[in-house]
Image (cartoon, coloured by chain):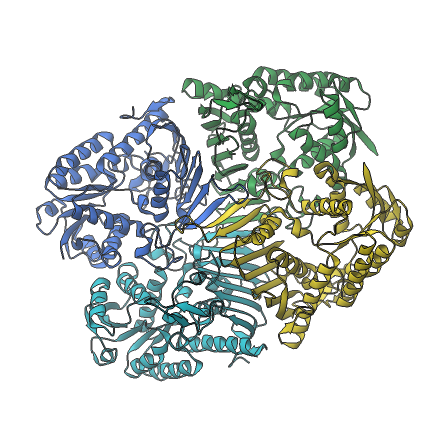
Chain colours: A cyan, B yellow, C green, D blue
Amino acid sequence: MTTVGVGMVGHAFMGRAHSQAWRSVGPFFGPPLTPVMAVLAGRSAERAGAAAAALGWATVETDWKELLRRDDVQLVDICTPGDSHAEIAVAALDAGKHVLCEKPLANSVAEAEAMAAAAERARARGVRSMVGFNYRRVPAVTLARKLVDEGRIGTVRHIRAQYLQDWLSDPEAPFTWRMDRDKAGSGALGDIGAHIIDTAQFITGQSLAGVSALLDTFVPERPVPGGGTARVTVDDAALFIGRTDAGALATFEATRFATGRKNSLRIEVSGSSGALAFDLESLNELWFHDAAEDPRTAGFRRIVVTEPVHPYAGHWWPPGHILGYEHTFTHQLADLLTAIADGADPRPSFADGLQVQRVLAAVADSAASGRWVDVEGSE
Amino acid sequence: MTTVGVGMVGHAFMGRAHSQAWRSVGPFFGPPLTPVMAVLAGRSAERAGAAAAALGWATVETDWKELLRRDDVQLVDICTPGDSHAEIAVAALDAGKHVLCEKPLANSVAEAEAMAAAAERARARGVRSMVGFNYRRVPAVTLARKLVDEGRIGTVRHIRAQYLQDWLSDPEAPFTWRMDRDKAGSGALGDIGAHIIDTAQFITGQSLAGVSALLDTFVPERPVPGGGTARVTVDDAALFIGRTDAGALATFEATRFATGRKNSLRIEVSGSSGALAFDLESLNELWFHDAAEDPRTAGFRRIVVTEPVHPYAGHWWPPGHILGYEHTFTHQLADLLTAIADGADPRPSFADGLQVQRVLAAVADSAASGRWVDVEGSE
Amino acid sequence: MTTVGVGMVGHAFMGRAHSQAWRSVGPFFGPPLTPVMAVLAGRSAERAGAAAAALGWATVETDWKELLRRDDVQLVDICTPGDSHAEIAVAALDAGKHVLCEKPLANSVAEAEAMAAAAERARARGVRSMVGFNYRRVPAVTLARKLVDEGRIGTVRHIRAQYLQDWLSDPEAPFTWRMDRDKAGSGALGDIGAHIIDTAQFITGQSLAGVSALLDTFVPERPVPGGGTARVTVDDAALFIGRTDAGALATFEATRFATGRKNSLRIEVSGSSGALAFDLESLNELWFHDAAEDPRTAGFRRIVVTEPVHPYAGHWWPPGHILGYEHTFTHQLADLLTAIADGADPRPSFADGLQVQRVLAAVADSAASGRWVDVEGSE
Amino acid sequence: MTTVGVGMVGHAFMGRAHSQAWRSVGPFFGPPLTPVMAVLAGRSAERAGAAAAALGWATVETDWKELLRRDDVQLVDICTPGDSHAEIAVAALDAGKHVLCEKPLANSVAEAEAMAAAAERARARGVRSMVGFNYRRVPAVTLARKLVDEGRIGTVRHIRAQYLQDWLSDPEAPFTWRMDRDKAGSGALGDIGAHIIDTAQFITGQSLAGVSALLDTFVPERPVPGGGTARVTVDDAALFIGRTDAGALATFEATRFATGRKNSLRIEVSGSSGALAFDLESLNELWFHDAAEDPRTAGFRRIVVTEPVHPYAGHWWPPGHILGYEHTFTHQLADLLTAIADGADPRPSFADGLQVQRVLAAVADSAASGRWVDVEGSE
């Protein structure tokens, strides 16, 4: 049994989600490489130690650089805020460690370019990298991609994508690092907007070529726990319309002010011969319309994506026994470990992450200028 | 019993819908003025005669101008394509006839301005006018307006509006006057985009102040029944984002290429203390989230808008017995006849129709220029 | 143009619904016989006169027997409570008038037998009769019947039928004739239970052969408007399980105490190779699962039953423009008038109504005895 | 840190689900007792060894009796078919081991009585027992129970419960032990019927007092993998109606022939002042209607049960990040471990399991006799 030693950096929300995936990927997927949860890095020895005990990591480091020196670490899993992604990822790749990096890849195009370059260098030496757009691995989303790829909806004409949350709808919700541009890069745009950009591009196999955008901050000042207030330096909501490189029309909205919507990532794709619809709040379902059907019995079908023939589903439970949010991370690791074992490049790559970063930059530029902006790198 | 003689111009889709409303408004609403279906105007005596017999009109004219001369006509109902609205409406108003005009008000801002001016002149003489944005009278939409007006969702922050149809999704669908700019003014934009603009503005009580837009024609050439093809000179789809005069963010999409969606007009409004959602394919339902509820039991409520306390519903059937598309036209007439009897101005007025026309123009300008465009008349 | 003179007896809820259908069937269906709304019969001249004026009936009679003597009446439409159905229908048929009788056919099996016998006698003379189970003419229900008939769901194995209302859920809801056994025959059982029995048998083409049942009255005493209380002598709720003549298992529930459900008639049918589901609160939708589909893309399809290829729908509006409750009555008349013109027997016949009455009787017997009861006439 | 050594018997579907829960309960719930996955018992050393390696169990035994002798085992988790539950559970309890036993508790009332007696004996010595009706720990179901308990829906009047699967709909689906009465006790009735009986009784706090039932076997002979056929000696479907000890009316259906329904456990409860609805295929949602609301805005609310204030949810992810089927087992263990640490009796107890067994027996008796049957122990 070949193993791969894993070092994880960060142990907040994403660290907990990744840990559950590292614990689960073996029992359910029996991957060709067995992960060993070797070390957890966190700045506070105390907090990292408690997290490691709770989450199942064998040892702790307080400086992530130590991970690069440890022989028992072959893979670095980056779960920190976006401002440290570039430094850690580039160093890890240059040190010959495989890297899984949470999304968005970076806080700027420049950082993302450096990371993609490092990934390309590392690749030549057989070192793999992947960015954690986990929603690609929702079985319904993976199935949607396959159906588009097989031509089941024909030529894609429309993408409508929304990521709706409401945790900032209350003006008294407290200030966190996610509202600080220096830490987070942007607000709803990079946090959840990046997810719908990646997921929509993944499903359609098309890339956004240009956009017109609006960003806004509804509540510019928020209370800081402990006293005082802080200025919100990121967007509360991001809206844009655009066109893909293949000529489809797209509309996107990412907001933290969609009152009553907790985590509703919705994507609908209309094609010349079919359509697909998805909502993350019902993540076990894919809606599919086949325009070739007899109009008498045609309609959107609610596919419960839990059959053995569905992506990933057969590794879990019998049909109809639904999966949750966290399973996407386990799927991600199953694919990552398989790619490493096979000497293949996992997707989404850092180049994919860079492309998303360029879309984010075009959105920000368009919102600032009030003009259509082409996405860098699109022809 | 006071009556009002009605002359209707046009007897296609809208003429059939209006006729059913003229027949039904008496039995169900018992309005203060009883309509008399006096005369139907259509260019072909034969076709108009057959339509009058089928739809319940007493007599026929082949020139709409005759309606203005007839003493038994006090109200002209305009159901023709948009290119003739201005001429008929201005003449009718100037002749002292009340006017109900189908939407969109006109094919251009200039025409709409002339019509609004005529309406203003007529108003001074007690002559009433109304534009037929019938979806304001879907009981769920009227209820949504009331809830916003009562402050039940607080400050409006987001509008997301879609009008999705798919009857042109097939490239072989035949050419009709609706694809001809000279007749129709625009495509999806004016036909169904106008509906979501009016409905969203009506529900929120806010007006669009500026927009960034995209228009596209996916299928530029279509077969003509009988042979040959014709050039499509209007948009197949219209997308825009915008900001209201009160600072809410809005996203709109109107398309005839949303495969599998037959007549799905969806509006969701997020406010600081609640939210509303509606879909015309389920027109008896309004979804309402009250953010003031205990979070343990909070959620979007499916209100079946068929109770006696709901707008219009008590005039029809017992609770839970649902209404259909055509009922909105009956509600429209009930309100129009009441306004005329009361000497009040019905809404939506021609001024409301003009404002929608200005939004349509701003959308077209923005799509052409790739820039943000302010809506004329917004401050 | 051949006409048929109509006399209607009763002008309450059902009278209003039937009147709207008599007004609408011409414009939308252009039936081979044009109905003339000749006379409305009601016991009070004043109330009947007001109703006739509002609903569009030309004249009024205060004794329904006069209708049988009038030459301008060829068809009698019975919209009275169930206790008078038998007398009126038998007399009308024997007088050579076609009869449309509201459901349930009668308040007892004996009455229903007499009516079915009268229908059989009349039939020999070319006089037609029909019982008003209008939900057979919901387009989605008619389509469901066709799909079963075509074998699209294979052998029927399960029927699950519910008719859920809540208008008696409040113990203070007032006493009406519907709670009086002498007038109404039974409570939820005959009023709404009869509907799901007929609709389920219609869709499946099978008949209930035996049942085990429970009836209950939750609130035995109710306030009488004006003062005092009255004893409720009918069931508030009726539950039964049963087996059809073809061996399918069935479960039925009819109740006026399903809090929050206003008019929810739900039927799901599971077959060996497919399934169907329907809810009257969303009456434009039929859900269809085809078990022959690739399991990867199989699922219940939401068919929006508004296409030209769908039953009845093409006579109304374009695709996606939904119909309401009342349209079912218009469809019923279109079929009735066509059958009369064609010299054919319309369905559901009085024999069909009698069979439903026998199921109702078996349910009552089983509830009283606590034993399985075979339905009379089943082999 | 106090630990509890766990020995699990069986490693098929339920063994995999329980193992994932044993691995997850620590990281997410930090229970007062930390479980140690000490030993897995299975008849085949080879298969048990492979399962133990995959699922995270430290050692293996091929005779479950060895578990009772091991000092490192304080808790026995029984995941075998129903025919061995009684022997293992009684022996384990008598040996002083806490017991978690999968549902249904046993294959007969006699066995269940013996088990409940053993549990009662053990309880006197501080030894705890629990039966694995895991759906009580779906957060939405637990919330439903709380709302009923708080009086939010008033007096319960109706229960409608369905457990719909379709894995036997195909006559060619192979024979397994679940179709063998000797192994499984019964078919749909004990397997999934037991779940809806327990869940409905749990939510309402009421017990079934009597029933009328139907059982059927649609496909009496099935292919055996490897060749030949075997006789199905259990029910394919079970339907019953009944009355609770508090006078509510109930309807239940459990079937493996509900074509297109994969794992749809639906429960709707109507009360005098509210109602609740749930579907396991959307297990993160609870629908709640509050009849005390203003009728203008009343309706079933879709509560997304993922808020920190909801049962169990706060231990997992942020709001809107949904849970899956397997999480219920983790919740079950968190409560079991807490109860053991607190010296309290966990629920559902073996007495609860016995009561469900008595309902199952009454259903079978009624189906056989065609008569109403009182549930043993109900007064």
Q: Quadrant of the N terminus of chain B?
A: top right
Report how many numbered discs are placed on residues in the image: 0
Residue B188, percent across and down?
A: 67, 62
Identify which residue is drawn at 51% across, 81% down.
A376
A1 displayed left or right of B92: left
Residue D325 placement, left or right of A150: left
Rendered position, B348 above or below D348: below
User: Position of D370 compared to B267: left or right?
Assistant: left
In which quadrant of the rendered view does residue C54 lie?
top right
Q: Nearer the viewer, residue B198 or D5?
A: B198
Which residue appears farthest toward the front when viewing the image?
Answer: A228
Q: Report if residue C76 is visible in the image.
A: no
Q: Is residue D328 above or below residue D354?
A: below
Instruction: Give the residue drawn at x 63%, y 70%.
Output: B210
Q: Quadrant of residue B198?
A: bottom right
Q: Residue at x 84, y 47 (%)?
A: B74
* Residue C19 in the image, given as x and y percentages of width and height: 72, 32
Asked whether residue C271 appears in the rendered view, the answer is yes
Residue A80 appears at what percent x and percent y?
32, 73
Q: Quadrant of the C terminus of chain B?
A: bottom right
Pick the front one: B135 or C93: B135
